Image (tube, grey):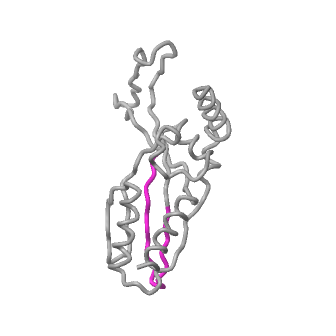
């Protein structure tokens, strides 16, 4: 009975948002104030919050006021320990597609902090999934002009995860106000 309930929930999640992921990720950036904290302290708080979400810090440019992370893959419903998804539609979209997220935090001259979360989809051109057994799946090589082959991994920007950006911004603000 438990397995049936889990299967039904997964099926409903896929129907609700698995194929319509562009609508799921049509959000924008989130803004928050620095509450008078100096830039060094704000960068420290931003690093802590991003590390708590298991993002690897890619670049910190204190002079320009930018912190970016590397892309992190998540599998939605299959990875309940990752809390990036803010809705069942986002969970289903990440489960049905291979999505990665990257966070960019920018500090304005006016003390404002802009948090953006970018979502991209991973594609594998030439990948043929065998329906009988996954181990019989194959990968073809797509040859283009002058004998070059296409990459076996392509990425496409899907949009921005505004809900997750708002949660990160809220955590940053909470830590700046609380400490």
The number of callouts visible is 0
Query: Residue 101, relative to residue 33: is it above or below?
Result: above
Q: Residue furthest bottom?
A: 36
Q: Residue at x 55, y 35 (%)?
A: 96
Asked whether residue 104 is drawn in magenta, I would say yes
Asked whether residue 132 is drawn in magenta, I would say no
Q: Residue furthest top?
A: 132
Most common secondary structure along the magenta stretch: strand
Quarter residue 125 falls in: top left
Q: Residue at x 38, y 24 (%)?
A: 141
Q: Residue at x 43, y 68 (%)?
A: 105
Q: Give the image location of residue 34, x and y in percent.
A: 46, 80
Quarter residue 31 falls in: bottom right
Q: Give the image location of residue 78, x and y in percent.
A: 49, 37
Q: Which residues are magenta?
A: 100-116
Looking at the figure, which quarter contains the C terminus? bottom left
Query: Residue 33, relative to residue 151: is it above or below?
Result: below
Q: Give the image location of residue 74, x and y in percent.
A: 45, 44
Given residues 116 and 37, the one toward you in this image is 37
Q: Give the image location of residue 139, x and y in percent.
A: 40, 22
Q: Residue furthest front?
A: 1
89 vs 48, left or right, is right
Looking at the figure, which quarter contains the N terminus? top right
Quarter residue 172 falls in: bottom left
Q: Residue at x 46, y 41 (%)?
A: 79
């Amino acid at each position: 009975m438990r397995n049936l309930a889990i299967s039904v929930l997964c099926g409903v999640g896929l129907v609700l948002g698995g194929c319509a992921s562009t609508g799921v990720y049509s959000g924008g950036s989130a803004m928050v104030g620095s509450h008078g904290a100096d830039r060094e302290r704000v960068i420290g708080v931003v690093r802590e919050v991003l590390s708590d979400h298991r993002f690897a810090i890619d670049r910190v440019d204190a002079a320009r006021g930018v912190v970016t992370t590397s892309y992190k893959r998540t599998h939605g419903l299959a990875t309940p320990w990752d809390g990036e998804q803010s809705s069942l539609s986002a969970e289903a979209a990440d489960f049905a597609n291979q999505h990665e997220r990257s966070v960019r935090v920018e500090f304005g001259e006016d003390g404002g902090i802009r948090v953006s979360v970018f979502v991209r989809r991973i594609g594998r051109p030439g990948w043929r999934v065998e329906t009988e057994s996954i181990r019989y799946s194959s990968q073809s090589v797509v040859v283009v002009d002058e004998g070059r082959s296409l990459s076996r991994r392509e990425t496409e920007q899907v949009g921005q995860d505004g809900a997750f950006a708002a949660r990160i911004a809220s955590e940053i603000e909470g830590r700046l106000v609380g400490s």
